[in-house]
């Protein structure tokens, strides 16, 4: 059963071959950016780590900064427009660049701590 609505879209973040984590994109946080991401689904890219607080993957989504922040909590999802990257916060963090908040990871995010070079992120809508 889907818990998606007009203002919140539940997606799946898959670490290919390793884990699946539910991810809510919240339109009220950044309507233009979330809309652009939703129109671009499914998205896939190689996983990268930035320090011990952020894992991300680059996309082809083109969007500007919207409701920018530089401080995020564990489980937050943000969009970094300069690289077209979707970022997942493993810990509370203050980032040097501002990002657009777009959602929240739900459930156990510990699988993100085991990201290795060559892992692939895929984000998509679950189909029933």
Image (cartoon, rainbow, N blue to C red):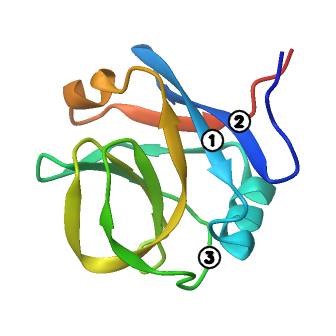
Task: Identify the element where label 2 is drawn.
Answer: strand
Q: Which residue is mark 1?
A: 24
At x 69%, y 62%, the residue is: 34
Q: Please give left or right for residue 39 compared with residue 61 in the image.
A: right
Q: Which x, y percent locates residue 109?
A: 36, 27
At x 29%, y 34%, the residue is: 118
Q: Which residue is mark 2?
A: 10
Q: Please give left or right for residue 31 compared with residue 93 in the image.
A: right
Q: Which x, y percent locates residue 28?
A: 71, 65
Q: Which mark is residue 48?
A: none
Pick the quarter of the image with the C terminus.
top right
At x 51%, y 45%, the residue is: 104
Task: Identify the element where label 1 is drawn.
Answer: strand
Pick the quarter of the image with the N terminus.
top right
Question: As displayed, is residue 111 above or below residue 75?
Answer: above
Closest to the observer, 64 or 122: 64
Q: Are marks 2 and 1 in contact (CB under 8 Å)?
A: yes
Question: As displayed, is residue 92 above or below residue 68?
Answer: above
Q: Which residue is mark 3?
A: 62
Question: As displayed, is residue 72 above or below residue 73?
Answer: below
**CA distance for labels 3 and 1:** 20 Å
Mark 3 or mark 1, earlier in chain? 1
């Amino acid at each position: 059963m889907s818990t998606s609505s007009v203002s919140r879209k539940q997606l799946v973040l898959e670490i290919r071959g390793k884990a699946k984590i539910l991810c809510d994109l919240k339109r009220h946080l950044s309507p233009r950016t979330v809309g652009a991401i939703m129109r671009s689904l499914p998205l896939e890219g190689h996983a990268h780590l930035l320090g011990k607080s952020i894992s991300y993957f680059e996309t082809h989504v083109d969007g500007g900064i919207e409701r920018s922040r530089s401080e995020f909590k564990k489980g937050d999802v943000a969009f970094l427009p300069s690289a077209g990257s979707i970022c997942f916060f493993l810990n509370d963090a203050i980032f040097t660049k501002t990002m657009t908040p777009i959602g929240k990871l739900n459930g156990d995010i510990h699988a993100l701590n085991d990201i290795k070079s060559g892992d692939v992120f895929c984000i998509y809508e679950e189909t029933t």
